[in-house]
Amino acid sequence: MQRNPSDAKSSLAEPRSAASDRSIRREPKPLREGVATSGPPLSCQTNCSAGLPSIVVGVFVWAWLVRNVVGQYNGLAGGVALAIIMVPILTRTVEETLRIVPDPLREASLALGIPRWKTIMRVVLPTAQAGVITGVVLSLARAGGETAPLLLTALGNQFFSLDLLQPTAALPIQIYNYARSPYADWQAKAWGGALVLITLIGVLSALTRWAIARRTSGTR
């Protein structure tokens, strides 16, 4: 059994992405006083981060967290690297989803005297929940197949370990190690690992769509 740094990366990526989306979101003119100045820089930062090669992210986290903070390869650094990869994808997807939420919904909520933060939490986000969850699944799918940053951070481990400050096994690393092996049985295991990874992502996507459809039909 192997522990994947994705357990740590999801909790790191999603709160930051939600905060970024609220500040990037450009409201209609009467509603965006003080917001438009913070939107473009964050949007530019997100676009630049989305274009970074994953190996560059891995080198950055290795130089900062592995070499200077922890002092050795560790699962926490792998989670941080994958979180950095996830955040731009999640942010851009959720931002575009929030843009298509009808403005009259926000205006009606604010006209009733509801605070802006409650309007976002109770009106905007529930309306855009399908797109938000889709963004989470897309970012998980992208991070789930990354190998280069994990080789520079988590390194891999042939034994089961729950210690995030030690080298940690991950399915993409195992697939990589088995695929480059000269042994036919190891190469077969690499194909099997790839199938498991694709199946996990497909099952996660199917369960997400089923949960969204069930909740949507239940609210009608």
Image (cartoon, helix red, strand yellow):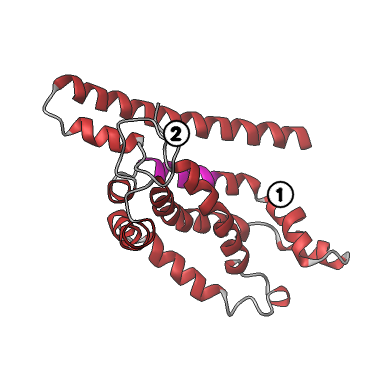
The magenta span reads 134-145
Q: List the single residue furthest toward the front.
A: 71
Looking at the rendering, in which quadrant would you find the N terminus?
A: top left
The answer, for residue 220, to whether it is visible in the render is no
Residue drawn at x 72%, y 60% is 120
Q: Which of the marked residues, 2 or 1, is nearer the chain's N terminus?
A: 1
Q: Position of residue 74 (x, y in %)?
A: 37, 47
From the viewer's perspective, is 207 left or right of 109?
Answer: left
Looking at the rendering, in which quadrant would you find the C terminus?
A: top right
The answer, for residue 2, to whether it is visible in the render is yes
- Helix, strand or loop at disc 1? helix
Residue drawn at x 77%, y 54% is 122
Between 158 and 219, the one nearer to me in the picture: 158
User: In the rendered image of this protein, does residue 99 appear above or below residue 83?
Assistant: below
Q: List the single residue furthest toward the top.
A: 185
Mark 2 and mark 1: Cα distance apart in space: 24 Å
Predominant secondary structure, magenta span? helix
- Location of residue 118 (image quadrant): bottom right
Residue to which mark 2 is pinned: 201
Residue to which mark 1 is pinned: 126
From the viewer's perspective, is 27 left or right of 20?
Answer: right
179 within the magenta span: no
139 within the magenta span: yes
